[in-house]
Image: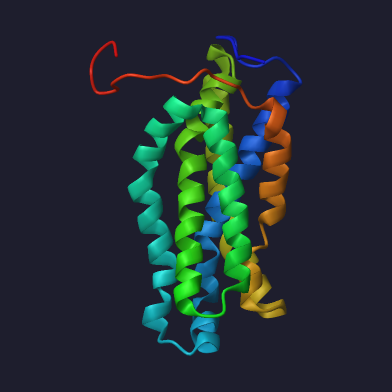
Amino acid sequence: MPVTTDGLPKPRRYLAVFAISCGTALNVIDGAIPNVALPTIARDLGIEPSTAVMIVSVYQLVLVMTLLPFSALGERVGLRRLYQAGQCVFVFSAVLCFFAPDLPLLLAARTLQALGAAAALSVSSALVRSIYPEGQLGRGLGINSVVVASAAALAPVLGGFIVAEVSWPWVFVATVPLGLLSLAAGHRSLPDLPPRSGRYDLPGA
């Protein structure tokens, strides 16, 4: 069902907001939650603590470097398609992180995870603009900001609890249910905008 300038109709709008919120929380939490587990990961893998920082650094670098290219790609292949594909890659790579036996494979999985996160996050704001009516766009962006801030605050608490109660690989799959919920809710609820083509750096293109 194509979206109109008045946003999505209810209750589809609420389901789409739920899908975007779950996906945003998933990406934010999984980007920060390993910080708490780094000393434990370093000890169990037999590496220096300074080397273990690469688990976080690689994720952040790949995420930042690929946001803009994925944003342009989303305009060409469709925002919903790229968002859902990014969530699939993110969930799959989270499982790879869980089973990674050493640092090189863990870094490879984290790189793939960052690509999935970048694909989803690069188009999430554009999807929010299409979900809400023009007069309620501020509310939509506000809700999205609250989700980001809440997820960032929850990540260290959740990471500390997981490391204290179970083994460190669980920090990478703790939020997989959020990804599955986002995929299921977004399958039919997210707006299906037609792809665009042409130059984006020229007026009127």
Q: From this view, report whether residue 180 is shown above or below residue 202.
A: below
Nearest the viewer among 173 and 84 is 84
Give the color scheme: rainbow, by chain, secondary structure or one colour: rainbow
Going by the picture, which residue comes out furthest to the left?
202
Total label count? 0
Going by the picture, which residue comes out furthest to the right?
11
Q: Is residue 139 visible?
A: yes
Nearest the viewer among 66 and 146 is 66
Identify the residue at image location x=55%, y=64%. 33
Q: From this view, report whether residue 108 is shown above or below residue 123.
A: below
- Residue 167 appears at what percent x and percent y? 67, 79
Q: From this view, report whether residue 69 is shown above or below residue 167.
A: above
Q: Which quadrant is home to the C terminus?
A: top left
Q: Is residue 151 visible?
A: no
Q: Quadrant of residue 175?
A: bottom right
Nearest the viewer among 81 and 67 is 81
- Residue 199 appears at what percent x and percent y? 28, 21
Q: Which quadrant is home to the N terminus?
A: top right
Identify the residue at image location x=69%, y=32%. 187
- Residue 93 appears at what percent x and percent y? 57, 59
Identify the residue at image location x=60%, y=14%. 3
- Residue 147 appears at what percent x and percent y? 59, 42
Nearest the viewer among 84 and 22 is 84
Q: Quadrant of residue 50?
A: bottom left
Identify the residue at image location x=42%, y=19%. 196
